[in-house]
Image (spheres, coloured by chain):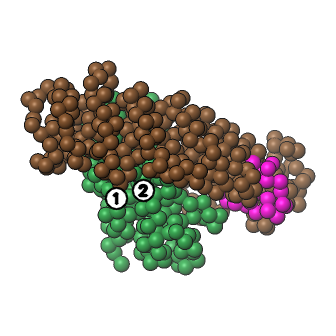
Amino acid sequence: MFFYMQILDIAGLQNEDGSFSGDIWGKVDTRFSYIVICCLSILKCLDKINVKKAVDYIVSCKNLDGGFGCTPGAESHAGQIFCCVGALAITGNLHHVDKDLLGWWLCERQDYESGGLNGRSEKLPDVCYSLWVLSSLIMIDRVHWIEKAKLVKFILDCQDMDNGGISDRPNYAVDIFHTYFGVAGLSLLEYPGVKTIDPAYALPVHVTNRILFTK
Amino acid sequence: MDFDETVPLSQRSEWADVVPLTQDDGPNPVVPIAYKEEFRETMDYFRAIYFSDERSPRALRLTEETLRLNSGNYTVWHFRRLVLEALNHDLFEELEFIERIAEDNSKNYQLWHHRRWVAEKLGPDVAGRELEFTRRVLSLDAKHYHAWSHRQWTLRALGGWEDELDYCHELLEADVFNNSAWNQRYYVITRSPLLGGLEAMRESEVSYTIKAILANPANESSWRYLKALYKDDKESWISDSSVSSVCLNVLSRTDCFHGFALSTLLDLLCDGLRPTNEHKDSVRALANEEPDTNLAILVCTILGRVDPIRANYWAWRKSKITVAAM
């Protein structure tokens, strides 16, 4: 895999303002900032990009509610927040996050009735936000602001007890993505029997340890 | 379209000269997908023209067939762009093509990226059309993230700011809880070249927002918008009496959720607002507990009760209150 890195021109996808395009055609989105930073850190060649500019661009996507969108001025969205906070975490730049303000925005995602998390104000709870919101809260050290037991119950209620798997909300059809998000969420909630995952990489800790701490 | 989609490509004379290229999954494919025959065959023909780099009218038609089977395949969209350019194809027709694909599923990153590429080539003349297209998508889902992203891009790159604030109002009339519309409103007042900027717009926007809050006090978006209007200007935020007044107004009501009014009042107190007797009486009226002399602490106690799922957060807020914030 490291051989192919020489062919891959990641640095060429970074724009003047520090943002990243998804491909040569130029669509910019903070998701790509996260993907590049995550991948290059795993491959141990973050020096291929201008990290400072990448961070500056992510910070320019910070909104007054403490959250982040896909581009400057775009609505704060838990998925984009995960990407931005994850990228800042991996590059050691979490000091740019207003953790108290964002922490409150994130814990406001929890619905009193179901215990589930949504991704934006007044949207429905969805199991996938168990990863995006929860990871973000853990990265900024504010996960104790949500009601964990209620969220565990919500995730477990999204299981298909006959055929297995987890869906986006109770009694909906299951799919592999939401099964993954649900299990990842349970891991982040320290559910017994589930291995620990790294919130920034969404990978098991024993995997990230092996990758990041061996030469 | 003048092809018969039901006839397999291998049986169409038009494609007789092309040797389909099968997918190379390698010797030990991990989780190989059980493709349907039609899908597999179409992709085999697409691979053939992609690798031979054939940028012809039939190639364009084939990309359409392929996208109808999987509109998420960004390689196909990418190749379609190359073909469109090579053929100097009518891009207005392409806008219509995108709209047809969007009818099936508009929550598709590749589709919106393609739309932007086409619109950028057509330039400011299509600003109105892009605003109209996103308006149609938003009429089906008023919080459609891709549509809002495209709409913001359109305004920035092509223009059309004139009616945007009115459009936000229209959406908020339909659903005052639409956080996307509130976000767009903020986008307009801070970035529109036709308006005077945040400070110039503050008074009218505060008035607008307070009206919305009073109609629906349980609306997270309107309270956050109110605070955002005072971005970086703490002095105005605590000294503008209409802000604390709306808190008092809501707290005096018995028919609504008090959480956001209380948290806004808490923020004001922590930012230096000196509470009046009216503030104190208003809060104490809601307290079951023995009223603490520290008003901010009492507000946190009440919040722990009215917003119990975030009890840990309100307990933390309470712990942060210094004696100075009374």
For label 1, the residue is: A97
Q: Are labels 1 and 2 assigned to the same chain?
A: yes
Residue located farthest toward the top when viewing the structure as drawn:
B255
For label 2, the residue is: A62
Q: Residue B89 colored magenta?
A: yes
Q: Say whether marks 1 and 2 touch (CB < 8 Å).
A: yes
Residue B8 in picture, x, y percent from top left? 81, 46
Q: Which residues are magenta?
A: B70-95
**Drawing shade for chain B:** brown
Q: Is residue A52 above or below residue A33?
A: below
Residue A207 seen in the current view: no
Residue B2 seen in the current view: yes
Q: Nearer the viewer, residue A60 or A149?
A: A60
Within 10 Å of disc 1 (Cα), the crowding (few <14, some 14-19, many 20+) is: many
Q: Nearer the viewer, residue B221 or B46?
A: B221
Amino acid type at circle 1 is Val
Q: Image check: B94 left or right of A200?
A: right
Residue A26 in picture, x, y percent from top left? 62, 64
**Drawing shade for chain A:** green
Residue located farthest toward the right when viewing the structure as drawn:
B13
**Badge 2 element:** loop
Residue located 28% across and 20% down the image:
B254
Specify the principal SS of the magenta part: helix
Q: Image check: A125 left or right of B252?
A: right
Q: Residue A116 colored magenta?
A: no
Label disc, if present, on residue A158 of the rendered structure: none
Q: Chain of mark 2?
A: A
Marks 1/2: CA–CA distance = 8 Å
